[in-house]
Amino acid sequence: MTAMEGKRLRIGLLFIGPWIFGFLLLSVYPVVASLYFSLCDYSVLSRPVFIGWQNYGDLVFDELFWKSLYNTIVYASLLIPLGFLVSFALALMLNFDLRGKGVFRAVIFLPSLVPMVCLAVIWRWMLNGEFGLVNTLISPLATFLNAWIGTDFQPPSWLQEAVYAKLGLVLASLWCVGNAVVIYLAGLQDVPRHLYEAAEIDGANFWHKTRHITIPVVSPVIYFNSIMALIGAFQVFAVPYVMMRGGNGPDGIGGPDRSLLFISTYIYQNAFDYWNMGYACAIGLILFLVILGLTLLATKISANRVYYAGS
Protein backbone atom coordinates (compact mmCIF):
# COMPACT_ATOMS: atom_id res chain seq x y z
CA MET A 1 0.00 0.00 0.00
CA THR A 2 1.41 3.36 -1.03
CA ALA A 3 1.44 6.42 1.20
CA MET A 4 -1.32 8.01 -0.87
CA GLU A 5 -3.54 4.90 -0.60
CA GLY A 6 -2.95 4.76 3.17
CA LYS A 7 -3.93 8.41 3.49
CA ARG A 8 -7.13 7.83 1.49
CA LEU A 9 -7.93 4.79 3.64
CA ARG A 10 -7.54 6.79 6.85
CA ILE A 11 -9.71 9.59 5.47
CA GLY A 12 -12.35 7.08 4.40
CA LEU A 13 -12.35 5.38 7.80
CA LEU A 14 -12.60 8.78 9.46
CA PHE A 15 -15.74 9.61 7.51
CA ILE A 16 -17.36 6.18 7.87
CA GLY A 17 -16.22 5.75 11.50
CA PRO A 18 -19.31 7.35 13.14
CA TRP A 19 -21.61 5.08 11.14
CA ILE A 20 -19.57 1.97 12.02
CA PHE A 21 -19.60 2.96 15.70
CA GLY A 22 -23.35 3.54 15.65
CA PHE A 23 -23.96 0.27 13.80
CA LEU A 24 -21.89 -1.72 16.28
CA LEU A 25 -23.42 0.01 19.32
CA LEU A 26 -27.06 0.19 18.24
CA SER A 27 -27.44 -2.90 16.03
CA VAL A 28 -24.77 -5.54 16.55
CA TYR A 29 -24.46 -5.22 20.35
CA PRO A 30 -28.25 -5.48 21.04
CA VAL A 31 -28.50 -8.61 18.89
CA VAL A 32 -25.52 -10.29 20.55
CA ALA A 33 -26.69 -9.21 24.04
CA SER A 34 -30.21 -10.53 23.34
CA LEU A 35 -28.78 -13.86 22.25
CA TYR A 36 -26.76 -14.11 25.47
CA PHE A 37 -29.60 -12.96 27.74
CA SER A 38 -31.94 -15.49 26.11
CA LEU A 39 -29.71 -18.15 27.62
CA CYS A 40 -29.89 -16.58 31.09
CA ASP A 41 -32.26 -16.05 33.97
CA TYR A 42 -32.17 -12.25 33.91
CA SER A 43 -34.49 -9.79 35.64
CA VAL A 44 -32.61 -6.57 34.73
CA LEU A 45 -32.33 -5.74 38.45
CA SER A 46 -29.77 -8.50 39.10
CA ARG A 47 -26.88 -10.09 37.29
CA PRO A 48 -27.81 -12.62 34.57
CA VAL A 49 -27.47 -16.28 35.55
CA PHE A 50 -26.63 -18.65 32.70
CA ILE A 51 -29.23 -21.44 32.37
CA GLY A 52 -28.57 -22.68 28.85
CA TRP A 53 -31.56 -23.55 26.65
CA GLN A 54 -34.09 -23.61 29.47
CA ASN A 55 -35.95 -20.49 28.24
CA TYR A 56 -36.41 -22.07 24.82
CA GLY A 57 -37.53 -25.32 26.40
CA ASP A 58 -40.12 -23.43 28.46
CA LEU A 59 -41.48 -21.85 25.29
CA VAL A 60 -42.49 -25.26 23.97
CA PHE A 61 -44.94 -25.70 26.86
CA ASP A 62 -46.02 -22.05 27.14
CA GLU A 63 -49.65 -21.85 26.03
CA LEU A 64 -49.61 -18.04 25.99
CA PHE A 65 -46.63 -18.03 23.62
CA TRP A 66 -48.42 -20.29 21.15
CA LYS A 67 -51.60 -18.25 21.57
CA SER A 68 -49.74 -15.03 20.81
CA LEU A 69 -48.02 -16.64 17.80
CA TYR A 70 -51.37 -17.90 16.49
CA ASN A 71 -52.97 -14.47 16.93
CA THR A 72 -50.08 -12.80 15.14
CA ILE A 73 -50.23 -15.21 12.19
CA VAL A 74 -54.02 -14.81 11.85
CA TYR A 75 -53.74 -11.02 12.03
CA ALA A 76 -50.97 -10.96 9.41
CA SER A 77 -52.92 -13.36 7.17
CA LEU A 78 -55.89 -10.97 7.23
CA LEU A 79 -54.04 -7.67 7.02
CA ILE A 80 -51.45 -8.35 4.30
CA PRO A 81 -53.84 -9.37 1.45
CA LEU A 82 -56.51 -6.84 2.46
CA GLY A 83 -53.89 -4.13 2.80
CA PHE A 84 -52.58 -4.92 -0.68
CA LEU A 85 -56.05 -4.84 -2.25
CA VAL A 86 -57.03 -1.55 -0.58
CA SER A 87 -53.74 0.27 -1.12
CA PHE A 88 -53.27 -0.91 -4.71
CA ALA A 89 -56.88 -0.07 -5.62
CA LEU A 90 -56.50 3.43 -4.14
CA ALA A 91 -53.23 3.90 -6.02
CA LEU A 92 -54.90 2.87 -9.30
CA MET A 93 -57.70 5.39 -8.75
CA LEU A 94 -55.30 8.17 -7.79
CA ASN A 95 -53.25 7.46 -10.91
CA PHE A 96 -56.08 8.68 -13.13
CA ASP A 97 -55.98 12.27 -14.31
CA LEU A 98 -58.78 13.53 -12.05
CA ARG A 99 -59.56 17.05 -10.90
CA GLY A 100 -58.38 17.61 -7.36
CA LYS A 101 -56.34 14.40 -7.23
CA GLY A 102 -53.70 16.19 -5.16
CA VAL A 103 -56.29 16.74 -2.43
CA PHE A 104 -57.35 13.09 -2.51
CA ARG A 105 -53.72 11.98 -2.28
CA ALA A 106 -53.16 14.20 0.73
CA VAL A 107 -56.33 12.96 2.45
CA ILE A 108 -55.38 9.31 1.97
CA PHE A 109 -51.82 9.88 3.18
CA LEU A 110 -52.68 12.02 6.24
CA PRO A 111 -53.77 9.11 8.52
CA SER A 112 -50.26 7.67 8.15
CA LEU A 113 -48.93 10.74 9.95
CA VAL A 114 -51.12 10.17 13.01
CA PRO A 115 -49.11 8.71 15.95
CA MET A 116 -49.98 5.10 16.75
CA VAL A 117 -51.23 5.99 20.25
CA CYS A 118 -53.66 8.56 18.84
CA LEU A 119 -54.74 6.08 16.19
CA ALA A 120 -55.50 3.49 18.87
CA VAL A 121 -57.55 5.93 20.96
CA ILE A 122 -59.53 7.10 17.92
CA TRP A 123 -60.33 3.60 16.74
CA ARG A 124 -61.16 2.42 20.23
CA TRP A 125 -64.05 4.89 20.14
CA MET A 126 -64.91 4.21 16.50
CA LEU A 127 -65.19 0.47 17.24
CA ASN A 128 -67.32 1.02 20.34
CA GLY A 129 -70.19 -1.44 20.11
CA GLU A 130 -72.85 1.03 21.30
CA PHE A 131 -71.77 4.48 20.17
CA GLY A 132 -69.00 3.80 17.61
CA LEU A 133 -69.01 5.27 14.12
CA VAL A 134 -68.38 1.89 12.49
CA ASN A 135 -71.54 0.36 13.95
CA THR A 136 -73.47 3.54 13.18
CA LEU A 137 -72.60 3.01 9.51
CA ILE A 138 -73.31 -0.73 9.63
CA SER A 139 -76.68 -0.48 11.42
CA PRO A 140 -78.78 0.60 8.36
CA LEU A 141 -77.25 -2.22 6.28
CA ALA A 142 -77.92 -4.73 9.08
CA THR A 143 -81.51 -3.55 9.35
CA PHE A 144 -82.01 -3.90 5.58
CA LEU A 145 -80.51 -7.40 5.47
CA ASN A 146 -82.54 -8.54 8.47
CA ALA A 147 -85.75 -7.35 6.82
CA TRP A 148 -84.84 -8.78 3.42
CA ILE A 149 -83.30 -12.12 4.39
CA GLY A 150 -84.98 -12.59 7.76
CA THR A 151 -81.81 -12.85 9.81
CA ASP A 152 -81.18 -11.32 13.22
CA PHE A 153 -77.72 -9.85 12.66
CA GLN A 154 -76.68 -7.06 15.01
CA PRO A 155 -73.54 -4.91 14.71
CA PRO A 156 -70.90 -6.52 16.91
CA SER A 157 -69.07 -5.19 19.93
CA TRP A 158 -65.78 -5.28 18.10
CA LEU A 159 -63.31 -5.12 20.95
CA GLN A 160 -65.41 -7.09 23.44
CA GLU A 161 -65.98 -10.20 21.30
CA ALA A 162 -63.11 -12.54 20.50
CA VAL A 163 -64.57 -13.40 17.09
CA TYR A 164 -64.49 -9.78 15.89
CA ALA A 165 -61.54 -8.34 17.82
CA LYS A 166 -58.91 -9.09 15.16
CA LEU A 167 -61.22 -7.84 12.40
CA GLY A 168 -61.61 -4.57 14.28
CA LEU A 169 -57.84 -4.25 14.57
CA VAL A 170 -57.46 -4.97 10.85
CA LEU A 171 -59.93 -2.16 10.09
CA ALA A 172 -57.89 0.21 12.23
CA SER A 173 -54.68 -0.87 10.47
CA LEU A 174 -56.20 -0.38 7.00
CA TRP A 175 -56.72 3.27 7.88
CA CYS A 176 -52.94 3.76 7.56
CA VAL A 177 -52.28 2.41 4.06
CA GLY A 178 -51.15 5.85 2.90
CA ASN A 179 -47.46 4.95 2.88
CA ALA A 180 -48.05 1.93 0.66
CA VAL A 181 -50.36 3.96 -1.60
CA VAL A 182 -47.65 6.57 -2.19
CA ILE A 183 -45.10 3.87 -3.08
CA TYR A 184 -47.55 2.10 -5.40
CA LEU A 185 -48.41 5.42 -7.03
CA ALA A 186 -44.75 6.14 -7.71
CA GLY A 187 -44.42 2.72 -9.31
CA LEU A 188 -47.55 3.19 -11.43
CA GLN A 189 -46.26 6.46 -12.83
CA ASP A 190 -43.14 4.68 -14.09
CA VAL A 191 -45.11 2.21 -16.23
CA PRO A 192 -44.23 2.98 -19.90
CA ARG A 193 -47.19 4.56 -21.65
CA HIS A 194 -46.45 2.85 -24.97
CA LEU A 195 -47.33 -0.53 -23.41
CA TYR A 196 -50.84 0.72 -22.65
CA GLU A 197 -51.17 2.23 -26.11
CA ALA A 198 -50.13 -1.00 -27.80
CA ALA A 199 -52.59 -2.98 -25.64
CA GLU A 200 -55.42 -0.57 -26.49
CA ILE A 201 -54.75 -1.08 -30.18
CA ASP A 202 -55.15 -4.82 -29.60
CA GLY A 203 -58.50 -4.19 -27.87
CA ALA A 204 -57.45 -4.63 -24.25
CA ASN A 205 -59.74 -3.14 -21.61
CA PHE A 206 -58.79 -1.70 -18.22
CA TRP A 207 -58.73 -5.07 -16.44
CA HIS A 208 -56.62 -6.68 -19.16
CA LYS A 209 -54.09 -3.84 -18.99
CA THR A 210 -54.00 -4.01 -15.20
CA ARG A 211 -53.44 -7.75 -15.12
CA HIS A 212 -50.98 -8.13 -18.00
CA ILE A 213 -49.11 -4.79 -17.90
CA THR A 214 -49.54 -2.86 -14.65
CA ILE A 215 -49.10 -5.67 -12.15
CA PRO A 216 -46.05 -7.29 -13.86
CA VAL A 217 -44.29 -3.93 -14.29
CA VAL A 218 -44.87 -2.82 -10.69
CA SER A 219 -44.23 -6.30 -9.26
CA PRO A 220 -40.95 -5.14 -7.59
CA VAL A 221 -42.97 -2.48 -5.76
CA ILE A 222 -45.60 -5.06 -4.78
CA TYR A 223 -42.84 -7.33 -3.48
CA PHE A 224 -41.26 -4.53 -1.44
CA ASN A 225 -44.56 -3.41 0.10
CA SER A 226 -45.53 -7.01 0.85
CA ILE A 227 -42.28 -7.67 2.73
CA MET A 228 -42.66 -4.42 4.69
CA ALA A 229 -46.28 -5.30 5.48
CA LEU A 230 -45.19 -8.77 6.65
CA ILE A 231 -42.58 -7.33 9.00
CA GLY A 232 -44.96 -4.66 10.30
CA ALA A 233 -47.80 -7.13 10.88
CA PHE A 234 -45.62 -9.47 12.93
CA GLN A 235 -44.34 -6.56 15.02
CA VAL A 236 -47.76 -5.05 15.78
CA PHE A 237 -47.78 -3.66 19.31
CA ALA A 238 -48.83 -0.06 19.98
CA VAL A 239 -52.40 -0.07 18.64
CA PRO A 240 -53.71 -3.28 20.33
CA TYR A 241 -51.78 -2.47 23.51
CA VAL A 242 -53.34 0.98 23.87
CA MET A 243 -56.76 -0.23 22.73
CA MET A 244 -56.96 -2.93 25.40
CA ARG A 245 -55.07 -1.25 28.22
CA GLY A 246 -57.55 -1.05 31.05
CA GLY A 247 -59.91 -3.45 29.26
CA ASN A 248 -60.31 -7.20 29.35
CA GLY A 249 -57.50 -9.67 29.86
CA PRO A 250 -54.67 -9.88 32.37
CA ASP A 251 -53.39 -6.43 33.30
CA GLY A 252 -55.79 -5.04 30.72
CA ILE A 253 -53.80 -6.62 27.88
CA GLY A 254 -54.89 -9.28 25.43
CA GLY A 255 -58.56 -8.48 24.93
CA PRO A 256 -61.43 -10.98 25.12
CA ASP A 257 -60.14 -14.55 25.39
CA ARG A 258 -56.65 -13.09 24.76
CA SER A 259 -57.59 -12.67 21.10
CA LEU A 260 -55.43 -9.53 20.82
CA LEU A 261 -52.38 -10.92 22.59
CA PHE A 262 -49.60 -10.71 20.02
CA ILE A 263 -45.96 -11.76 20.22
CA SER A 264 -44.68 -8.20 20.61
CA THR A 265 -47.14 -7.63 23.45
CA TYR A 266 -46.10 -10.86 25.12
CA ILE A 267 -42.44 -9.84 24.86
CA TYR A 268 -43.29 -6.52 26.54
CA GLN A 269 -45.21 -8.26 29.31
CA ASN A 270 -42.39 -10.65 30.14
CA ALA A 271 -39.72 -7.96 29.97
CA PHE A 272 -41.37 -5.04 31.77
CA ASP A 273 -44.35 -6.47 33.68
CA TYR A 274 -42.88 -9.75 34.91
CA TRP A 275 -39.20 -8.65 34.80
CA ASN A 276 -38.25 -11.82 32.97
CA MET A 277 -35.89 -10.28 30.42
CA GLY A 278 -34.15 -13.52 29.51
CA TYR A 279 -37.43 -15.16 28.57
CA ALA A 280 -38.46 -12.05 26.63
CA CYS A 281 -35.18 -12.14 24.69
CA ALA A 282 -35.81 -15.78 23.79
CA ILE A 283 -39.29 -14.90 22.45
CA GLY A 284 -37.82 -11.95 20.56
CA LEU A 285 -35.26 -14.17 18.82
CA ILE A 286 -37.98 -16.66 17.92
CA LEU A 287 -39.96 -13.77 16.41
CA PHE A 288 -36.87 -12.72 14.46
CA LEU A 289 -36.45 -16.25 13.08
CA VAL A 290 -40.14 -16.45 12.13
CA ILE A 291 -39.98 -13.12 10.24
CA LEU A 292 -36.68 -14.12 8.60
CA GLY A 293 -38.08 -17.47 7.53
CA LEU A 294 -41.27 -15.99 6.09
CA THR A 295 -39.28 -13.29 4.30
CA LEU A 296 -37.00 -15.90 2.71
CA LEU A 297 -40.06 -17.97 1.77
CA ALA A 298 -41.74 -14.96 0.16
CA THR A 299 -38.53 -14.18 -1.73
CA LYS A 300 -38.30 -17.78 -2.93
CA ILE A 301 -41.93 -17.87 -4.09
CA SER A 302 -41.70 -14.51 -5.87
CA ALA A 303 -38.33 -15.17 -7.51
CA ASN A 304 -39.88 -15.97 -10.92
CA ARG A 305 -42.82 -13.61 -10.52
CA VAL A 306 -41.08 -10.28 -10.00
CA TYR A 307 -40.17 -8.43 -13.18
CA TYR A 308 -37.15 -6.14 -13.19
CA ALA A 309 -36.63 -3.91 -16.20
CA GLY A 310 -33.56 -4.97 -18.13
CA SER A 311 -33.36 -8.40 -16.52
Image: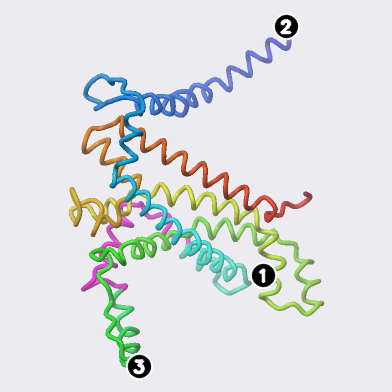
- The answer to whether the residues at label 2 and label 1 have Cβ atoms under 8 Å apart is no
- Pointer 3 residue: 148
Disc 2/disc 1 C-alpha distance (Å): 59 Å
Residue found at the far top of this picture: 3
Q: Amino acid at mark 3?
A: Trp
Which of marks 1 and 2 precedes in the sequence? 2
Callout 1 amino acid: Thr
Q: Earlier in the sequence, mark 1 or mark 3?
A: 3
> Which dot marks residue 3?
2
- Left or right: residue 283 versus residue 132 is right
Binning the other alpha carbons within 10 Å of mark 3 as few (below 14), some (14 to 19) or many (20 upward) gives: few
Q: Which residue is mark 1?
A: 210
Depth check, front residue: 88 or 227: 227
- 87 magenta-colored: no
Q: Position of residue 232 (x, y in %)?
A: 45, 49
Does 27 sit left or right of 136 as displayed? right
Above-or-below relation of 70 to 213: above
Say which element carries label 3. Answer: helix
Q: CA distance from mark 2 to mark 3?
A: 88 Å
Q: At 63% across and 72% down in the image, what residue appears?
A: 97
Residue ID at (40%, 59%): 173
Q: The N terminus is located in which quarter?
A: top right
Give the residue at x 81% y 71%.
198
Mark 1 or mark 3, which is nearer to you? 3
Residue 188 is situated, as x and y percent measured from the top left of the image, at 65, 62
Amino acid type shown at disc 2: Ala
Pick the front one: 236 or 200: 236
Q: Which residues are magenta?
A: 109-134
Circle 1 SS class: helix
Q: Which tag, 2 or 3, sits closer to the chain's start?
A: 2
In the visual, does 256 lie left or right of 305?
left
